[in-house]
Image: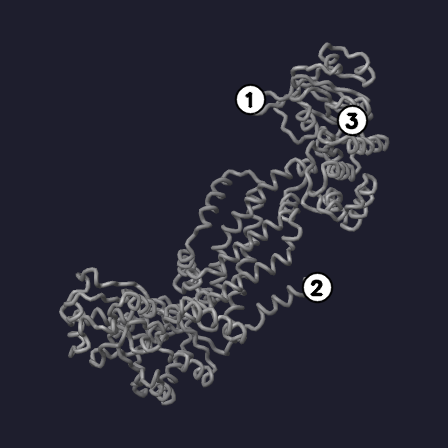
Amino acid sequence: MGDLWQGLSQAFWLVLSADAELVEIAFRSLRITVSALVLACLIALPLAALLAVRRFRWRRAVIATLNALMGLPPVVVGLIVYVLLSRSGPLGALGLLFTPTAMIVAQMIIIVPLVASIAHQSLRDLWQEYHDLLISLNVTQRQKIATLLWDSRRALLTAALAGFGRGIGEVGAIMVVGGNIDNYTRVLTTAIALETGKGEFALALALGFVLIALAIAVNLVIHWLGRTEREGAW
Amino acid sequence: MLRKIMLAASLAVWGGMAQAADVMKMAVTTSFHNSGLADILLPEIEKDLDLEVQLLVVGTGQALKLGRAGDVDAVLVHSRAAEEAFVSEGYGTHRREIMYNDFVFIGPSADPAAIASAQTATGALQAIAEAQAAFVSRGDDSGTHKKELSLWREAGLDAGAFGDWYRAVGAGMGAALNTASGMDAYILADRASWLNFGNKGGLALLFSGDPVLFNQYAYLPVNPELHSHVKSDLVAKLEAWLTSPRAAELINSYTIGGETLFVFNAKPAG
Amino acid sequence: MSDLFPLTVRDAVASRQGKRLVGPVNLDLSGQGACVVLGPNGSGKTTLLRLLHGIARLNKGQITWSCPKAEAQRRQAFVFQHPVMLRRSVLDNLAYPLLLRGVPRKSAQTEAAKMAERIGVSQMLDRPARVLSGGERQKVSLGRALICKPDLLFLDEPSASLDGRATREIEDILQSAKSAGTALILATHDMGQARRLADRVVFLLGGQVHEEGTATDFFARPKTQEAAAFLKGDIVEC
């Protein structure tokens, strides 16, 4: 219990004093996860739409795979990315191991199946609803996908937020591929792991509370921007 | 309005990615990093050499592996046999001793195996094995782990044949200390990690001082003939700094709670 | 632009999972005014309309317009029994078909606002279309169908679940569309509506055209026993 209180008050002071290192780490966490999320959405959303409206041979297999990959253990993703990016690996020449870019790549791989699966479900439902109308209006494939994506933007936002949550709280993969280098690849979760390792539970908890607060803040801001609550009837 | 907020937010998040002129990566052991010495040395290195040393904090085994794969430019570890193999296999150009600290035995302050009164490190281990008192082993192929295994061998015991009381956790120094603290077990730790450890609980330092417990750190530049991207000039610059009188002073004067942790013992070049 | 009509249907059959829904149907329509498709529930009215519009698959036979199929579909519009509202405002729902055809957003919205005026929903342009009442939704979907000035409008029981006032409003819009030159093909089992709107009648029974002719003839002198019974309000099994 003592650690918990100490952690809370320490978190409070860290935030209140805008501790330079904390701010830097928090922004790095945001930067990496948001970048990974944006890239993941660019892949996942069109993929989800395609899976919803196109009938092709491996469609069911792809959907089942995506659903299964939602539970992909991050540390395995980390290992695979590590082996690929290591200097002695196939992509070693890029020199990306232990850089923020490697962390973004790993998080992206973790996020894509989650966002694609959630997005696919809502897009599929909307497509069932819109099917007759859009066929009657003789839309092209592009227009169809654009309409579905735009009209389910709120559900897609929820999918993206789920992806953000998985990314920002993830430690296994980015620890492996980022290396937790101070001032470079250290983010909130890896810093927490480090402080826990040092037995500094209060500081680790403080960072944990900051992480939770950050996640909540991002969700609130996105909901506010999207006005999801006010116009729930859409 | 909305766009402005978004723009400001993204500037705040993506802006300000400044870095020193030169950057190199060095793999170091958990115990070195946990000692806190890195926090003293790195800013001075950046000041003196305009060189940012990015540390990858891992066990000795993984640190050497990173060096083999060419994923770091240099390695700073403490496991002599493995280091010499690393150099003789051609992965490193040479091995340069920098400093040493020592290992200590930590255990429950009640000391059920009475190791505090042991004469030697091997004697302490024999006492623990005799009492079958809980013992936490790093079990992660790290320098500390290798040291522990060699001590068991010297004590004439086979760590592979131990019963339930011997627990290999496969974790870093801090995590292993946390485990030992949680179950009131004995553990071999480096002095620095122990002094900096924040969750001591019912543990205490019970045995230290036997010369076999000295822990030599050495600097290993990764061989640029195997990995052409290695920044050999920076690695050499850092080696010169680490063996300089300036480093000697910083290392020798580093204390925690009044206790000296490291002894600088690099021989001048030549 | 070539003509859409005449429409020729030859031995058209549609079935699903081995069960025949419609057919074989033979039909010729010249496309003047309103053609009302009558028949009891399950007689295949909806399926026939969807086949003609090209949104249901034909298993056998042929449906030919006097222009290519894709062009024909572009010149038609369809109003469903249960209106499909896009998750957008009323204005954006009305403007949607224009946007699909590459009309710039500004002028599409101007057109949509005019259409809103015409169908009497201009005081709710900014409201989400999905919160409207049933009558309002059906008016919006009618407006959305008419906004590209189709040559032919299909309507599948457009007022099946509406009250008298909403039905009247819908019919007023249909009358004015008709007098502006839009042909109608309307499925209904509201006899009053059929009498008010129809120029021709197609009477379906068991998925086949049972009787077909001018509205005046059909209502005054039905040729078949079943049609007569249907008109009297007797229960007719399909």
Q: Are marks 2 and 3 in contact (CB under 8 Å)?
A: no
Can you identify the residue that label 1 sits on? C18
Q: CA distance from mark 3 to mark 1?
A: 32 Å
Disc 1 residue type (three-letter): Gly
Which is nearer the eye, A21 or B243? A21
**Dot 2, crowdedness within 10 Å: few (<14), some or many (≥20)?**
few
Q: Is residue B64 visible?
A: no
Q: CA distance from mark 2 to mark 3?
A: 53 Å
The label nearer to you, 2 versus 1, is: 2
Disc 2 element: loop
Disc 3 residue type (three-letter): Phe
Which is nearer the eye, A90 or B185? B185
Disc 2 residue type (three-letter): Met
**Left or right relative to A10: residue A230:** right
Q: Quadrant of residue B206?
A: bottom left
What residue is drawn where x is 64% and y is 49%? A232
What residue is drawn where x is 19% and y is 62%? B160
Can you identify the residue that label 2 sits on? B1
Disc 3 element: loop
Q: Please give the chain letter of the residue carrying mark 1.
A: C
Quadrant location of the C terminus of chain B in the rendered image: bottom left
| Residue B181 locus on image (x, y percent) | 30, 68
Can you identify the residue that label 3 sits on? C5
Which is nearer the eye, B116 or C141? B116
